[in-house]
Image (cartoon, rainbow, N blue to C red):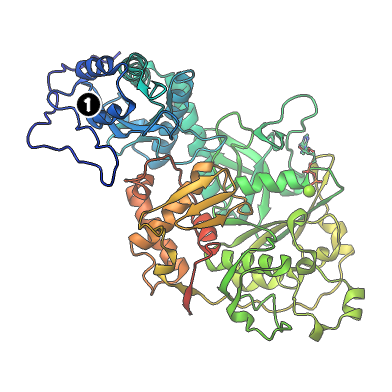
């Protein structure tokens, strides 16, 4: 246990009147409590508030000195039914050893580990901390700083009986549960072996992913990995006798040395075009889904700790109805019946095929060189066109160039690899570098067999989409009242300023907090002048990413009263592209 430092150091809030009267009919906010603001005083004040009107809680705002940590009451809810109040805990020394925080990867893992511990400890309390699901993603709620301080952001439902303060319960939560939590997060109280193993596992995943490019791989799936999930609504690993652990086909098996786990073996998915085939219900989509998630690190016990994909991998799908703003889709879409210039394609309401074409072109524009595609969610007419259809509808009547004719030039000319699930058509045999067949969840290398069935194919040309420069003013999150507005509705909608952004088809959002984070990132693109009317979308994302790497995730929301997690550049780009107000000023 750490010893509490003496308390008498409370900050003094003396001086002139701070009380701000609320405008237009609003009740004036109570002044912050003045004088000594330490733990004992907070306790006293809360007990004294018992039965007072709920608005008095606002007088708690500001810092409270708890000796070994500072509690800051940042936001106070207006009534018991409003979103929870927000508090922050900063503990300069929680005893975390440098080995657990000096390296950025371990710092992220240690923070995540402590956040999960905090969530467990807070069960049944009014204090709530945001933590991840199966992925380990930097988030605002629990951070370890560069110098090893612990920085928590917690939501608290300040208790009331109707519109009266329940000061006794509040006192219990803030003056007993909270300090107890902080003590229990002290490194001396933590199961150190477990915490170190957690960080080792994340560090191994990161090393595994970082090594893919040098090995000429786009993905790696370890032998023994558990890919299927418990159910469509649970991301936990499937358990029980029916689960088939992954086992690599001999011809694709590679072995990799990891810093902590030692040598692991598994299936290396080479660059180029990889086709995943097999009968219905044999596990194709489950494998692809694991690859989609392989851009993230997973918690120990997830089953996918050693399933990794290049960090630039983007899941591509059809998304009927989305808006498209001046995207160069000309590799896929040529002479439209409307005569529109498809190098500069705009629509409020894309079809299945044009939306998928836009999704591919935007992903490549944003820098992705790894595409993941599942036939389950594609537009067939953008994927294939068979001979009989070509005989009936001649080339000059068909504006679409199917992906099967572009997937090779994409790789040969631009190093864009594709992993594609396709059980319904053999056309991709013609262009695949490797074909993996799933048979009752067991992968087999059937490349040779598929090659004997391949035909010659006349391929099309893929020119890189023209880069776009957007008007930063069109990416404004201010409402008509001039206030910033960023909210999330489930995993479906990002409310941004006056508009809603439909993110249901952005499948690599894995954490609700990332959706909020992407909204904050859009705002940061504008406020940080990364989008400056000169830089292209990709350059602006580069610039934001650089700043984020330096300053950490809290850069996104210093003034934001809610939880959020770090999105990838590709999801930030995806949200930008789905913003209905987006205006492109020119293409380069
Ligand atoms: P496909 O895309 O080939 O039609 P899916 O990937 O959707 O098949 O998988 C079908 C079902 O099999 C799903 O319910 C999935 O959870 C289950 N499944 C997938 N892989 C495994 C596995 N390795 N072991 C046990 N069940 C699995
Ligand atoms: Mg499927």
> Residue 370, position in %: x, y?
61, 59
Q: Is residue 69 above or below residue 144?
A: above
Q: Residue at x 65, y 68 (%)?
A: 349
Q: Position of residue 512 (x, y in %)?
A: 53, 42
* Quarter of the figure with residue 58: top left
Can see residue 154? yes
Compared across the picture, whether 511 is left or right of 103 comes to right
Residue 189 sits in quarter: top left
Residue drawn at (52%, 38%), measured in percent from left and top? 204
- Examine the image and state in which quarter residue 33 appears: top left
Q: Which quadrant of the picture is home to ligand 1?
A: top right
Q: Provide residue 201's location: percent of width, then percent of height.
A: 52, 33
Q: Which residue is mark 1?
A: 64
Q: Is residue 524 above or below residue 279?
A: below
Most extreme residue toward the left is 15
Q: Is residue 189 left or right of residue 247?
A: left
Label 1 residue SS: strand
For the residue pair 362 and 254, the one nearer the viewer reads as 362
Residue 151 seen by the camera: no
Position of residue 379 relative to residue 69, above or below, is below
Q: Position of residue 255 (x, y in %)?
A: 63, 42
Q: Quadrant of the N terminus?
A: top left
């Amino acid at each position: 246990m750490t010893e509490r430092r003496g308390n008498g150091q409370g900050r003094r809030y003396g001086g002139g009147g701070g009380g701000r009267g609320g405008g237009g009919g609003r009740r004036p906010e109570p002044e912050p409590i003045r004088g000594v603001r330490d733990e004992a005083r907070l306790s006293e004040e809360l007990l004294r508030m018992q039965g007072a009107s709920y608005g008095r809680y606002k007088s708690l705002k500001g810092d409270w000195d708890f000796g070994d940590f500072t509690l800051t009451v940042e936001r106070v809810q207006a009534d018991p039914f409003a979103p929870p109040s927000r508090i922050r805990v900063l503990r300069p020394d929680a005893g975390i050893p440098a080995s657990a925080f000096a390296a950025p990867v371990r710092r992220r893992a240690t923070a995540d580990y402590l956040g999960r511990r905090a969530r467990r400890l807070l069960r049944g309390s009014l204090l709530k901390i945001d933590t991840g699901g199966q992925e380990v993603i930097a988030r605002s709620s629990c951070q370890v700083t560069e110098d090893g301080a612990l920085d928590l952001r917690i939501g608290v439902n300040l208790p009331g009986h109707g519109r009266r303060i329940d000061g006794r319960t509040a006192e219990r939560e803030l003056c007993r549960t909270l300090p107890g939590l902080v003590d229990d997060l002290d490194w001396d109280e933590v199961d150190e072996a477990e915490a170190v193993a957690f960080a080792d596992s994340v560090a191994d995943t990161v090393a595994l992913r970082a090594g893919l490019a040098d090995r000429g791989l786009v993905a790696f799936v370890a032998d023994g990995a558990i890919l299927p999930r418990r159910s469509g609504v649970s991301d936990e690993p499937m358990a029980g006798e029916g689960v088939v652990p992954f086992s690599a086909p001999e011809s694709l098996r590679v072995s990799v040395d990891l810093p902590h786990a030692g040598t692991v073996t598994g299936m290396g998915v080479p660059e180029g075009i990889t086709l995943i085939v097999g009968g219905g219900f044999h596990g194709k989509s489950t494998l692809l889904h694991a690859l989609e998630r392989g851009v993230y690190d997973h918690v120990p016990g997830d089953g996918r700790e050693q399933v990794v994909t290049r960090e630039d991998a983007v899941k591509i799908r059809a998304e009927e109805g989305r808006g498209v703003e001046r995207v160069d889709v000309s590799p896929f879409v040529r002479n439209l019946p409307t005569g529109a210039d498809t190098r500069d394609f705009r629509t409020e309401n894309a079809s299945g095929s044009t939306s998928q074409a836009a999704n591919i072109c935007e992903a490549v524009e944003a820098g992705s060189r790894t595409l993941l595609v599942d036939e389950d969610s594609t537009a067939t007419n953008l994927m294939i066109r068979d001979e009989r259809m070509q005989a009936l509808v001649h080339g000059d009547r068909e504006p679409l160039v199917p992906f099967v004719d572009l997937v090779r030039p994409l790789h040969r000319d631009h190093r864009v690899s594709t992993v594609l699930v396709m059980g319904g058509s053999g056309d991709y045999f013609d262009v695949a570098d490797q074909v993996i067949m799933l048979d009752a969840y067991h992968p087999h290398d059937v490349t040779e067999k598929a090659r004997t069935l391949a035909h010659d194919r006349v391929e099309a040309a893929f020119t890189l989409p023209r880069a776009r420069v957007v008007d930063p003013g069109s990416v404004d999150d201010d409402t008509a009242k001039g206030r910033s507005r960023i909210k999330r509705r489930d995993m479906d909608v990002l409310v941004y300023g006056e508009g809603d952004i439909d993110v249901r088809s952005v499948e690599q959002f894995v954490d609700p907090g990332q959706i909020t984070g992407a909204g904050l990132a859009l705002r940061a693109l504008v406020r940080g002048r990364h989008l400056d009317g000169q830089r292209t979308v990709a350059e602006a994302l580069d610039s934001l990413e650089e700043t984020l790497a330096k300053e950490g995730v809290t850069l996104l929301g210093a003034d934001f009263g809610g939880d959020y997690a770090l999105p990838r550049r590709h999801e930030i780009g995806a949200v930008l592209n789905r913003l209905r107000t987006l205006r492109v000023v020119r293409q380069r």
